[in-house]
């Protein structure tokens, strides 16, 4: 395996590249699928719990993995702070994170031939805030304004599939009306994206990918729990409805039990029983099986076709 870290953009973002290597003993022409991971963290940080352990699961399935640590200012710059103490110009201002993810994907595809990348499987996924950013790429990749900002042809950062776990899509107060825990997190998230805790409705709509789903949106896998105490599960339901309305292929799993931020939902990503849920942990295998081109076989990604 090859591993390296690359700085992205001008705001402190970086991406970690984990690349499978071809073997003369196995298949010297093999092409590998790729999973691009955007960890969550309320746009204030990127969570380790949605980084390394998830990476190892995908590597074990034969995927390349790119983990994008889009630029953030750190939770310590937000939690417990008054509005006057919050960052004046957050590193995470929209559309910085979207551009950074697009640039990280572009770098991968620019080296696709040398690295044995199967370009039919450039999956972009994320958790919580990271799912929002992954979804932004899914709904905006074809836009001319994004191509100008990224500085690369749009074909280089077009995702082939999306994987969205407990995504934070609607950041408005209306969208969060059933929240009962940590409502201030949404205020911090809005400030991280817009530099204000009270952005205009038009701004909030811009970062709500549900409102921009189109026939250009790639096939999507979504999952969340009903009892998520931070993110309203209605967002995932609305997302799948919008995909259905536009005839975009999708699969969605709504698990009843379990809170927010479960990641793999096992002891690799949690240290107490609240972060472990055997039923929810099945999302990973469900995703791999959904993605597989031949439903009678699990590992059917390793080809040029």
Image (cartoon, rainbow, N blue to C red):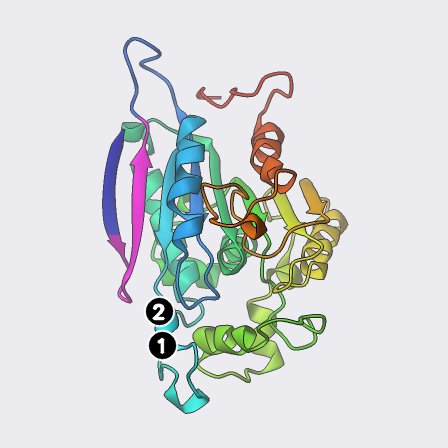
| Residue 92 in view, yes or no | yes
Residue 216: % across, % down: 60, 48
| Residue 148 visible at all | no
- Residue beneath the point at 30% across and 20% down: 22
Residue 104 is marked as none
Q: Nearer the viewer, residue 130 or 135?
A: 130
**Is 64 contained in the magenta span?**
no
251 relative position to 5: left or right:
right
Give the residues drawn in magenta, as a range: 7-20
Residue furthest out toward the bottom: 84
Query: Toward the viewer: 293 or 188?
Result: 188
Q: Quadrant of residue 174?
A: bottom right
Rendered image: mark on residue 74: 2
Residue 14 shown in magenta: yes
Predominant secondary structure, magenta span: strand
The residue lying at 61 percent from left, 43 percent from top is: 277
* Image-quadrant location for residue 26: top left
161, above or below 115, in the image = below
41 is higher (above) or lower (below) than 77: above
Query: Mark 1 — residue?
Result: 77
């Amino acid at each position: 395996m090859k591993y390296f870290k690359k700085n992205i953009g001008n705001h402190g973002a970086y991406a970690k590249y984990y690349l499978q290597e071809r073997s003369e003993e196995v298949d010297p022409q093999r092409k590998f699928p790729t999973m691009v991971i955007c960890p969550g963290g309320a746009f204030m940080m990127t969570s380790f719990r949605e980084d390394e352990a998830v990476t190892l699961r995908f590597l074990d399935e034969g995927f390349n993995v790119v983990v994008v640590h889009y630029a953030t200012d750190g939770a310590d710059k937000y939690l417990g702070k008054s509005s006057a103490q919050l960052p004046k110009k957050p590193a995470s201002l929209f559309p910085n994170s979207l551009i950074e993810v697009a640039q990280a994907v572009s770098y991968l595809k620019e080296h696709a031939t040398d690295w044995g990348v199967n370009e039919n499987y450039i999956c972009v996924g994320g958790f919580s805030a990271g799912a929002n950013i992954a979804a932004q790429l899914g709904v905006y990749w074809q836009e001319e304004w994004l191509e100008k900002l990224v500085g690369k042809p749009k074909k280089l950062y077009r995702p082939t599939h999306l994987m969205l776990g407990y995504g934070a899509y609607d950041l408005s107060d209306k969208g969060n009306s059933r929240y009962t825990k940590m409502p201030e997190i949404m205020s911090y998230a809005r400030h991280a994206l817009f530099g204000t805790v009270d952005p205009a409705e038009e701004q909030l709509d811009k970062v709500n990918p549900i409102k921009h789903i189109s026939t250009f949106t790639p096939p999507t896998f979504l999952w969340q729990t009903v009892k998520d105490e931070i993110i309203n599960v209605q967002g995932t339901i609305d997302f799948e409805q919008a995909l259905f309305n536009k005839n975009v292929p999708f699969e969605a799993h709504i698990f009843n039990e379990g809170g927010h931020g479960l990641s793999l939902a096992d002891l690799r990503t949690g240290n107490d029983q609240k972060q472990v849920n055997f039923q929810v942990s099945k999302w990973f295998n469900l995703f791999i099986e959904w993605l597989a081109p031949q439903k009678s076989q699990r590992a059917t990604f390793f080809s040029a076709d």
